[in-house]
Image (tube, helix red, strand yellow):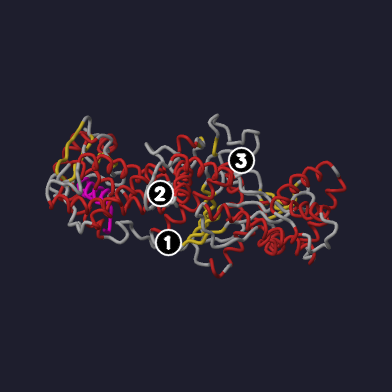
Amino acid sequence: MVDSVMGRVDDLLRQAFAAAGLPTEAVRSVPASKPEFGDFQCNAAMALGKAAKRNPRDIAAAVAEILRASPEFAAVDVAGPGFLNLRLADAFVTARARAQAASPDLGIVRRDDPPVLIDFGGPNVAKPLHVGHLRSLVIGEALSRIFAAQGVAVTTDIHLGDWGLQMGMLIAAIRRAHPERAPGTVGEAVTVDEMQRLYPEASAACKAEPERMAEARALTAALQSGDPQAFADWSALRATSLADQRHDIDRLGTRFDLFLGESDAQAIVDTLVPNLVARGLAYESDGALVIDVAEGSDAKPLPPLILAKSDGAATYGTTDLATIAGRATDPALARCGRYVYVVDERQSLHFNQVFRAARRCGIAPGVDLVHVGFGTVNGVDGKPYRTREGGVARLRDLLAEAVDKARGRIETDDPAIDRDVLAEQVGLAAVKWADLSTLRLSGYSFNLDRMMSFEGNTGPYIQYACVRIGAIGAKADAAGLRPSAIALGHPAERALAMACLRLPVAVAAATAGYAPNEIADLAFAVAQAFSRFYAECPVLNAEDEEARAARLALCGLAHAVLSKALWMLGIAVPQRM
């Protein structure tokens, strides 16, 4: 398939409007809001009528007359003041469903985009992953898969917070805790639990005690100047922390190609900042070093990007700008045409400043810089999710709770089902689906009871639908029954085929808007359509062999579409449920 059903409908609409002597720029269809209105609707005649000072209904009638000659349509009606209601011919829908089933990509259009780099995750060394990392990890992974499904090469980078004063604080605290070990060997002895306990203690001590802060600053300076003992301790702490974080990352099924961090940008910072000063792009303001990023078209003032504070310390802005510069000159990333940053929407000002600074400084001039923000994970009270004690919830604990709850919901005596494996798959699906089915910029309430339901718009419901379809195919195979070609003689069959045919449009919309919820919406629509089909159209016990074979083919398409959608969302399909 070279285009989607909606794409074909839009082409025919534009041709008809053009044949009627009307402009076509704003002509497009939308799925019908109700089944009685057909399959698609178009309201372009309304806007064109106003501009041309013509009755919109007359315009719609002229266009409808042209469209009725197209074999793709079974009916084209004019409704109300000038709406076009379009119902596709069953033969056209059948042909498209058969073509989709035969397509290795299920009709998903392959893009010729240059490679994409996706920057997400961003955990800090010495800290556990927490609930705030969840959205970045699952959205970033989903976007990576959505691009990959269209043939776009993707590189993913976690961008660790592994540099700066916090590292000096931690090294100093650990050396104090282990005076028996020589500097340079202390990091090897520290466990993750001890590191995570010492870090907040060190931070509080540095704020309260000037001598502790001086000690931390001295060790930070030593580390950044290449002191071998400080570097050895830092390397060991970084490795231990990352290994622990990767336990949660791997559990989520999130994949990173690069595990680079702020530390990898420091050599670039050392040359970039003096260069920007020499070029007159960075200047001193109130003791700090800044770059102006405001533009005349700004609706409100945009503060300059701070490269160095008054005490000389670099900022996140400095590191992010240097990271862009480093990526642009990295031979392995040279072909990337887009850097996508999947980071909390509350960082939108920061990324606006950094991206503008990059443009002004001529850094990565041919690369699109995109901030894909997202809302917060909230508790049932609508506020950012916290533990019962009011602390930040650890991601590991949250995932464990979800898996435990899933285990309690599983009711099976089937010895072929590994309850622990299934609980892991269902629990993670519930968490991911709740996140990815939500509009990206919206927050959502983390409610495990609702997420874990096997009814409604939930991960377990979609998994179960996919497993149930697969079971029909497995039983057919065991009985020696084979599918034929898709045929659509029942309204529920047609509705299921139409839902499956939305896949290419959903993928395109998810890509354009960095919106995994488009894929989730598609999967839910297919699951609902299959539920109706399953209730109204017997498959293995169909009325005759011809109907059974055609319905097996339709089940195969629905299973392939649901499996593909769940793969793009990073959700596993259990073998049995």
Q: Does 127 appear in magenta?
A: no
Give coordinates of residue 350: x percent, y percent: 61, 46
Q: Secondary structure at mark 1?
A: loop
Give coordinates of residue 286: x percent, y percent: 77, 46
Q: In the figure, is residue 534 to the left or right of 248? A: left
- Structural distance between the alpha carbons of marks 1 and 2: 14 Å
Give the residue number, with chain letter if any, for mark 1: 152
- Region in magenta: 1-18
- What amino acid type should be assigned to the residue bearing mark 2? Ala
Residue, far right: 211
Residue drawn at x 15%, y 41% is 75
- What amino acid type should be assigned to the residue bearing mark 3? Ala
Dot placed on the residue nearer the N-terminal end, 2 or 3: 3
Q: Secondary structure at mark 2?
A: helix
Query: Which is closer to the viewer, label 2 or label 3?
Result: 3
Dot placed on the residue nearer the N-terminal end, 1 or 2: 1
- Compared with residue 133, is residue 159 higher up or lower down, i.e. above or below? below
Asked if marks 3 and 1 touch (Cβ < 8 Å), the reply is: no
User: Of residues 348 and 496, which is closer to you in this image?
Assistant: 496
Give the residue number, with chain letter if any, for mark 2: 510
Give the residue number, with chain letter if any, for mark 3: 393
User: Of residues 93 and 346, which is closer to you in this image?
Assistant: 93
